[in-house]
Amino acid sequence: MVIARVMTKRCSSASTLVWIGGGDEDQAIAALLHDLVEHAYYEGIEEDIRGRFGDRVLNVVLGCSDVEPGVDRNSDDWEERAASYLQHLETADTDTLIVAWADKTSNARSLVNDLEAGRDVFALFDPNPERTINFYRDLADLYQRRMGDTREVRYLESLIYKLRDFYKVSKFWPIYQRTSLHFGDFHLSQTAEGTVGKFPFTAPVFVLTAANPMSVALPDEENAQRNSLLVTQLTRDGLQIMECVGRVDDWQEPGFLLHGDVTQEQARHYGRCHGQKAIFRIDEKSISVIDCVSGFRTDAGWVIEKA
């Protein structure tokens, strides 16, 4: 029986419900079964749920579904289903509202966890990832109206802020991933496969700059002043540095390679202090682009050649 199999599996929506310190047994069961009608429908499922768990659980399960029982979910009608779902929650009963919160909060938390682990989940939402974030924003606004300024609503809002920050960064990420680095006698380019060449350092190194904060292009003189302040800070902190230039297409940006006794957290801290979205980390196996705020990262191979 499908229901029995679902009940034996861990459900993040149910665990989210438990996290809030509320939710009774019927709500927890409904959280376990909340997407059964959408993803595992069979004729007679409503009678089975009612017979095993009662009308209250069935009503919540149906209330958390964005399609009628037995209707196929079509990606082409996503916006229509999302609007209808939001409209439904405006007047939904408290049971449905709580379980729906647990469901969507669990989903948002999974997205953030994947992004923090370096997975490009925004690619799943092409061609318009922003509409998914806006849907969650609309959900948070709805819960603010219906539930007030509770810790549950604040938690959902914190996840949405993170999603928005990741999305802003993701639009610049392809530029970082195409950037080649030039330091000393070496030229490093990024590649999708493996590494080629000899890594010229005995420990991981980091590349950052103070130029063009938050990807806003500044005049060369102002960038030089900003980098001068960065050098002063790095020298004061006793770090070993060498000049490094990042290049992509017809654009280039001066910066510095940090080597010796320096940690990733230190490098990210310097990047944040100087308004940078990301830094580079390079070791003998890969080159990583790392977001200065969230820690989101992607890894690639490299080719190092003598200039």
Image (cartoon, grey):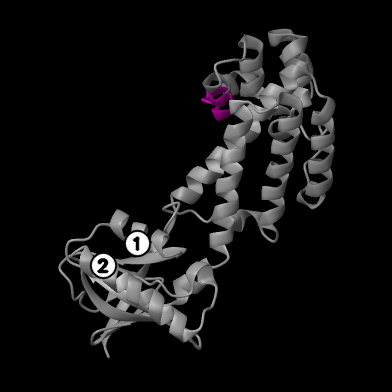
Instruction: Give the magenta part as a residue range.
Output: 9-16
Q: Residue at x 72, y 17 (%)?
A: 95
The residue that mark 2 highlights is 234
Q: Is residue 29 left or right of residue 19?
A: right
Labels 2 and 1 touching (C-beta < 8 A):
yes
Identify the residue at the far left of this view: 202
Q: Is residue 177 above or below residue 131?
A: below
Quadrant assignment for the C terminus:
bottom left
- Main secondary structure type of the part rendered in magenta: helix
Q: Nearer the viewer, residue 47 or 53?
A: 53
Across and down, in percent, residue 173 comes to 51, 66
Across and down, in percent, residue 5 comes to 57, 22
Quadrant assignment for the N terminus:
top right
Q: Residues within 10 Å of mark 2 (few under 14, many from 20)?
A: some
Q: Residue at x 46, y 80 (%)?
A: 222
Could you say whether the residue bearing mark 2 is in a helix, strand or loop? helix
Q: Is residue 307 left or right of residue 132?
A: left
Q: Residues within 10 Å of mark 1 (few under 14, many from 20)?
A: many
Q: Amino acid at mark 1?
A: Tyr
* Mark carried by residue 270: 1
Across and down, in percent, residue 305 comes to 27, 85
Q: Earlier in the sequence, mark 2 or mark 1?
A: 2
Q: Amino acid at mark 2?
A: Leu
Q: Residue at x 75, y 12 (%)?
A: 56
